Amino acid sequence: MTTEQNPSPTPPPEGEGVNPSPPSLAGKGALGSPPSLVGVGGGGFNLRPVLVLLGVFAVATAGFAVWYFAIRTPPTDLDRLQGDWQVSVRDRETQNVIQVKGDRWQSVANGVAARKYRVSLNPTANPKKIDLEALDVENVRGPRPNLHGIYALDGEQPRVWLAPGTEPRPTTFDDPDATVLTLTKVKLEPAPQKRK
């Protein structure tokens, strides 16, 4: 009988020894390394798009702030006159309202619209000058009913002193005979619709 000898065992493949090295803790938040944002299954949360979005938002916000506080032009005097204004004369309120829309100036007396004007301002003059050119004057006889005067934008209540275009332009608000209009911002309600 022949006996078969047991050949020597084959060595294990490399890396599969009897005492494998302990698993590495790198990338798992241990030993001072940051935790990984890689999730289960090899996917993960990519932080780059979020950082790009935050950067774009920061740049846009900074750009708006620079425009708003440094580049944006301040409102013109005509911009500041836009809207509906209650008229007071010598500190007494009247039923008259002045409406300024764009470069149009219109008086409304007791709810009835009066003549329309094209308003032009000269804010560099001292005192500031206002000119009102009458519109819709086909039926007017004699000189065109233009007005001119001076204005001041003191706080929330502009002051205006107007004279007919055929008379000299006022030059100061200190004149005791001046009929200075003081304007107070109001919101007009639309007229009720008539039922048929």
Image (spheres, rainbow, N blue to C red):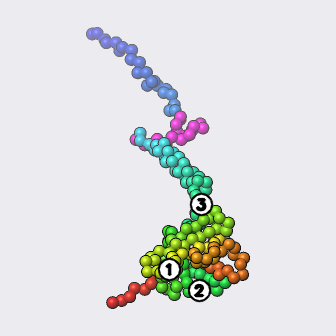
| Residue 35 location (% of width, % of height) | 53, 41
> Disc 3 or 2, which lies upstream in sequence?
3
Residue 65 makes an appearance in the image: no
On screen, residue 126 above or below 93: above
On screen, residue 186 above or below 57: below
User: What kind of residue is marked 3?
Assistant: Pro
Question: CA–CA distance between discs 1 and 2?
Answer: 29 Å
| Residue 106 location (% of width, % of height) | 51, 77
> Disc 1 or 2, which lies upstream in sequence?
2
What is the quadrant of the N terminus in the image?
A: top left
Query: Which residue is identified by label 2?
Result: 94
Instruction: Give the quarter of the image for residue 168.
Output: bottom right
User: Residue at 45% across / 84% down in the picture?
Assistant: 191
Element marked by disc 1? loop
Query: Which residue is identified by label 1?
Result: 142
Whether residue 102 sits left or right of residue 88 in the image: it is left
Whether residue 100 sits left or right of residue 158 in the image: it is left
Instruction: Give the quarter of the image for residue 93.
Output: bottom right
User: Residue at 52% across / 72% down in the picture?
Assistant: 133
Specify start and end residues of the magenta stretch as a single range.
Answer: 25-41
Mark nearer the viewer, 1 or 2:
1
User: What kind of residue is marked 1?
Assistant: Gly
Q: Are marks 1 and 3 in contact (CB under 8 Å)?
A: no
Crowd class of label 1 (few under 14; some 14 to 19; many from 20; radius 10 Å): few
| Residue 10 location (% of width, % of height) | 39, 17
Whether residue 175 sits left or right of residue 98 in the image: it is right
Q: Which mark is residue 74?
A: 3
Residue 66 makes an appearance in the image: yes
Closer to us: 96 or 34: 96
